Amino acid sequence: MKTQAFNPYLPSYEYIPDAEPRVFGDRVYIYGSHDRFNGKGFCELNYVCWSAPLDDLGSWRYEGEIYNKFQEPLCDGDHRALPAPDAIQGPDGRYYLYYAFDYFGVISVAVCDTPAGKYQFYGYVHHSDGTLLGRKEGDGTQFDPGIFVDDDGRVYLYSGFAPRRSFWEQLSLPVPAMSGGMVTELMPDMLTVKNGSRMLIPGVEDGSGTEFEGHEFFEASSMRKTGERYYLIYSSIKSHELCYAVSAYPDRDFSYGGTIVSNGDVGLDDRDEEEALNYTGNTHGSLVEINGQWYVFYHRQTNRHMYSRQGCAEKIRILADGSIPQVEMTSCGLNAGPLQGREKYEARIACNLLSREGSLQYAEGISVSEVHPYFTQDGEDRENHPDQHIANMTDGSIAGFKYFDLDFPARIGIRYRGKGTGAFCVSTDIGGVPLVRIEVNPAEAWTELWAEITAEVKGVYPLYIEYQGEGAVDLIGFEIQ
């Protein structure tokens, strides 16, 4: 029997953002950076890999550590970061891992004979004269590499970093000559530059008046191809959205396509950032086709800051005209369909989370007030703390779960703890008429309360759990019987 698949799709203790999904053989592999629970910075841990069988996307297997930061020659201490990587099978059959180490502005490459084995440092992407790409005058900033081998065997590297001009001014650095998304063709050795870099998508300083205005390139390049179309996926200057550009060529003539996913559902139904349905922050990911179905992988934020991110995925559609309609965040993205209506569920799979004041963007300088709920876990030990939950639900806080195949009347049980006195109200609409109201009182330990849902509800619906009352409570899960 296949396992139900949830978002986030990896275990509750695992924080793997920036996912590049790749199908090798009969499994899909995830290559991403590795955040620490309640970390103090991005990408603090070493690269690990997870994989799942193509016919059971709810059964993820830990492949182990595949690359250690101390294998990188530039590494001078554990304080260094291993930002978002990408991996591809090269023309020689080996697997190549590309990464931009700790913001040094150059691209490193590691190699392995298997998709998830122990990678070994291979070298730096460089010009034919030996100068590292990113160190020659005119080179753009090398960051978040995406690697692509076309059907004809030609190899293309996509990269770039394009913050606002003020970012460089604060660091007393010149704005790079190339500030946007760019492509560089490589030789078959996977290291040597064949043709110089070319701009594909403008950054925010060059986007005014172009079709990319408002969704200019920021970071997170990733290339995919289907049919005769090339799709360059990237994180826009808005940060919370993955966008795409499309072309008939891998190295020129890209046109803006649209937003594929936002980690606050911004843009859907004309929703603006102040109406986001989740706490937003940066995102990074890409597309993969599995058994004829395309998916987008992205990530969400936890712990009231930017540094503990978790991977999510959603089904997408690529239409006949090449467009990709924006999809919403769900709790069941990799599942074959909606979740079973009678089962036990963890609160951590909530795809919407709001306070009575709405949500906000996690970013430097943003103050998160005491009214806001958040995802977290008890303790810092990884495998021994599968207790991720929603903490600090204050009056008006809402956790939303999408979607379930419901068949009510039924019983529902909610597990909570906290000092609050009030009630959990369960409904199928945000702010809708409650199907049931479950009274709660202060409880130091996790406590389960049950109630009968007498209303008749049949079909595919979301569920929203809202706390109404004084104080604050934590929600760890619920069960429908």
Image (tube, rainbow, N blue to C red):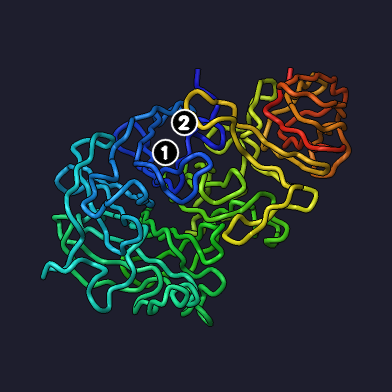
Residue 385 vertical position relative to residue 174 in the rendered view, above or below: above
Q: Which residue lies furthest to the left in this view?
A: 129
Q: Which residue lies furthest to the bottom in this view?
A: 209
Compare residues 323 and 471 and report the one nearer the observer: 471
Q: Distance between the residues labelled 2 and 1?
A: 10 Å
The percent coordinates of residue 17 (x first, y second) are 46, 45
Compare residues 122 and 276 and report the one nearer the observer: 122
Compare residues 57 and 304 and report the one nearer the observer: 304
Circle 2 crowding by C-alpha within 10 Å: few under 14, some 14–19, many from 20: many
Q: Which residue is drawn at 31% across and 57% down?
A: 100
Task: Give the number of the disc on residue 57.
Answer: 2
Answer whether labels 2 and 1 touch (C-beta < 8 Å). yes
Q: Residue at x 40, y 66 (%)?
A: 161
Badge 1 amino acid: Ile
Q: Residue at x 74, y 47 (%)?
A: 370
Residue 468 vertical position relative to residue 236 in the rendered view, above or below: above
The percent coordinates of residue 425 (x first, y second) are 84, 33
Badge 2 amino acid: Leu
| Mark 2 or 1, nearer chain start | 2
**Left or right: where does residue 406 sit relative to residue 330?**
right
Q: Residue at x 21, y 52 (%)?
A: 73
Q: How many labels does the image show?
A: 2
Disc 2 is placed on an element classified as loop
Q: Residue 112 is drawn in which quadrant?
A: top left
In the picture of the structure, the residue carrying the numbered disc 1 is: 290
